[in-house]
Amino acid sequence: MQGAPLPVVTDAPAREAAFSEYGSGGPPFTMKMLEELPKPWGYDTIIASLWAREAEGRRKMVRTQRWKYVHDPMLVRNGGATQTSGSDGGPGEVDELYDLENDPWELRNLAHLPEYADVISDMRLKLADWMISTEDFVPVPLPRQVGRTGN
């Protein structure tokens, strides 16, 4: 299926971009939060940490045939500029930009490289238009704890 077009079930023209979002606005899951979970760590810890990480942030994604751009509007950035923790975009408070033609496994984040500023501008515009047209006026409730209660 890699690289093959998806099946067509309608006569409507193909969309230029696809969009997705992830997270309900929760805080980042930290090592301190992990250390506060009951020990010994095991299955319950994995489930609790996954639950918390699914809720963190409000990542938004736009994907075109060639590019994938991910942004979290909740992250604080220096004057709105894309930040990166490493030379290739490593972990941290970063936007993500991947060239899916040349990097289909999304191994190299290009968001911090100045030569991709025009691509990022175009993808941000697409994302902003989508967010304006679809954003809920009532936010998703934030979790009040890490993990679940009572199983």
Image: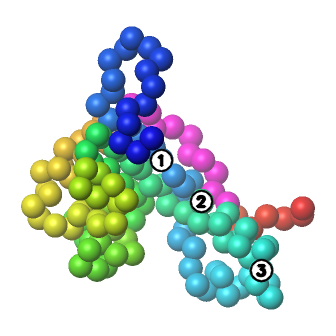
Let me know if residue 77 appears in the view: no
> With 151 as the anchor, is 115 left or right in this view?
left
Coordinates of residue 35 in the picture (x, y in percent): 67, 87
Residue type beneath disc 3: Gly
Coordinates of residue 149 in the picture (x, y in percent): 84, 65
**Image quadrant in which the N terminus is located:** top left
Residue 76 lies, with reference to residue 121, above or below; the image says: below
Range of residues picked out in magenta: 133-143
Q: Residue at x 39, y 75 (%)?
A: 91
Q: Looking at the image, is mark 2 or mark 1 earlier in the sequence?
A: 1
Residue at mark 1 to residue at mark 3: CA–CA distance:
29 Å
Coordinates of residue 73 in the picture (x, y in percent): 38, 56
Q: Are marks 2 and 1 in contact (CB under 8 Å)?
A: no
The local crowd at label 2, few if under 14, some if 14 to 19, many if 20 or more residues have their Cα within 10 Å, is many
The local crowd at label 3, few if under 14, some if 14 to 19, many if 20 or more residues have their Cα within 10 Å, is few
Residue type beneath disc 1: Glu
Res 123 → quadrant? top left
